[in-house]
Amino acid sequence: MSAQALYRKWRSQAFDEIVAQEHVTRTLRNALRDGRVAHAYLFTGPRGTGKTSMARLLAKAVNCIGETEEKPCNQCAICRSITDGSSLDLIEIDAASNRGIDEVRDLRDKVNFRPNECRYRVYILDEAHMLTTPAFNALLKTLEEPPAHAIFVLVTTEPQSIPMTIISRCQRFDFHRIGLPEIVAHLQHVAAAEGFQITADALEAVARQATGSMRDALSLLDQLMAYRHEEITLTRVQEILGSASGEAVSALARAIVASDVPQGLRLINDTLDSGVDPRQFSKELLDYLRGVLLAKIGGESALVNVTKETLAEMRDLANRIPLERLMVAIRAYNQAGLDLKEAVHPRLPLEMALVEATLPAERVAVASQPVEEQRAAAMQPEARADAPESVPAAASRPTTQRRRQEPPVAAPAVQEIPRVPAPQEAVPAEPMPAPAQVDSGPSVAWFTENWKDILAAVRVRNRSVEALLNRSCEPVAANGNVLTLAFFHEFHQQKIEQAKNREVVEAAISEMVGRPFGIKCVRYEGDGAQRAAQQERKEIKERQEKAIESDPIVRAMVDRGGKITDVRPLEG
């Protein structure tokens, strides 16, 4: 017979046993004492923080028939039946596997039946965010006006996926991640009760690995109990969990501060050769670098839970590394942790992060650009030489977002060069952009040419705003970092000038250009309706021309030397 898992054996059976969720337990206790129990609750929060345990405690408390003042008593027949799972009036539904409208309709039909032996029938919907939209709609009316004997408890880790119509009919309680001291104290209590010997630093390592989840911490402790014949030390925990030693992490941090790439590479490979999990190694290094960052800005005493010796070492490294380089290192290893999930070679993201973290400051921005931009820049050296104004824009581009390569301001002139008949006039020296034009930004011609791409960027952010812009305005001027849009109708202009809509448009333009860009809205000089109609006819004609050019017969004639001179509608 298999042994019962620790997280099930030590599930909280009383409100006093719930760890670090006092804001929830106090509210529910007061509601029980005053007889103000709600008909629907929503318990949200990270995994392993006690949501389902609290729901079962609530079911016991509202139905407890014991004579004790504190509920639940855990001694009466109802409390015992709920504890051992034999009660017919506590119904737990896994919404992940019963997520359809048919299951909810079945629940809605049965909710009117009175409880068998309890005062209330309690329905616990675990993973409630997995219900489909039709299922939520079917549940809505029952949740709003349930029978007097029914209580619903929705449990979820993703409250943003629950419709607001459902949330508004529940009392919501947010469960917090459990702090490191609380997890360590509870693990010490469990280990002592189980007769399990484990050192304090090993317990702390287990608690850190759990990242605020008591269930994960108990599962890890359960795994360590296989070594119950001997005391579990930190070294044993690191072997089982695949984590690195503190010395390896601090040594790599020192290599980053000293810009010692060869030493850093040796440390990474030696650590991974010893069996350490790459993702765990990256996480522990990030925790360490976070401590260095907090020491740099003076907030480590309250936010870092390490020994005095480790704290002193973090402060020493903080004094030896500039803040900018430290931020680059943290971002690099945070990205490495994400890349490790799909990495073909598990060491490569850690090694690349090391190289990036030790680059000189002037090369960090170039190394952080998306691969597509670096490849495009490497393949077009001539374009960069002819258009120096594009370089400042690329250098000022944020490195954390993927950007389109901004075309140079003089791009239209470069495109006209092949069509000039006289070779001696192809590359005039005089029209080269003056230094003052470098900061002028893209021309209005560039915005006109790329207007459809800008509208697509707006559509990603807000479809309504894109619909307002489409066919209602056109770029007419670009000065500095401001694009002037001329609107055909006053209504469209006023809507775009609203703060929230303006922000959407400016964000999309800034993304396309690669630097902050604003807009200015003006009325089109002339008959706006006539101009809009002309624009629509122009677009129709362009679509017709594209359709004709893509016709196989037309393409074949063009390939043989033919030329399209005009496009006219068929008569008759």
Image (cartoon, rainbow, N blue to C red):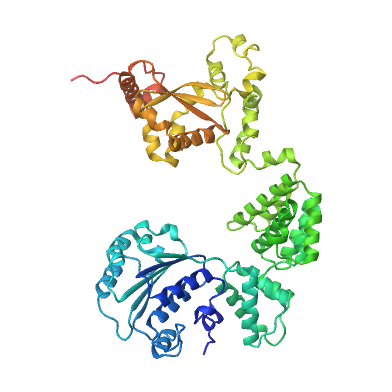
Question: Residue at (62%, 9%) from the top-left corner?
Answer: 424
The residue sitting at the front extreme is 34
Give above or below for 453 relative to 8: above
User: Quadrant of the rendered structure where residue 83 is?
Assistant: bottom left
User: Quadrant of the rendered structure where residue 102 is?
Assistant: bottom left
Left or right: residue 223 compared with residue 110: right
Question: Residue at (34%, 58%) from the top-left corner?
Answer: 165
Residue 34 is situated, as x and y percent measured from the top left of the image, at: 40, 75
How many numbered circles does the render carry? Answer: 0
Front residue of 56/330: it is: 56
Question: Residue at (58%, 76%) from the top-left corner?
Answer: 219
Question: Residue at (40%, 87%) from the top-left corner?
Answer: 81
Residue 195 is situated, as x and y percent measured from the top left of the image, at: 65, 88
Residue 301 is situated, as x and y percent measured from the top left of the image, at: 73, 60
Residue 336 is situated, as x and y percent measured from the top left of the image, at: 64, 54
Asked if residue 56 can be seen in this view, the reply is yes
Give above or below for 414 relative to 461: above
Quarter the C terminus occupies: top left
User: Quadrant of the rendered structure where residue 300 is?
Assistant: bottom right
Asked if residue 48 can be seen in this view, the reply is no
Give above or below for 92 relative to 566: below
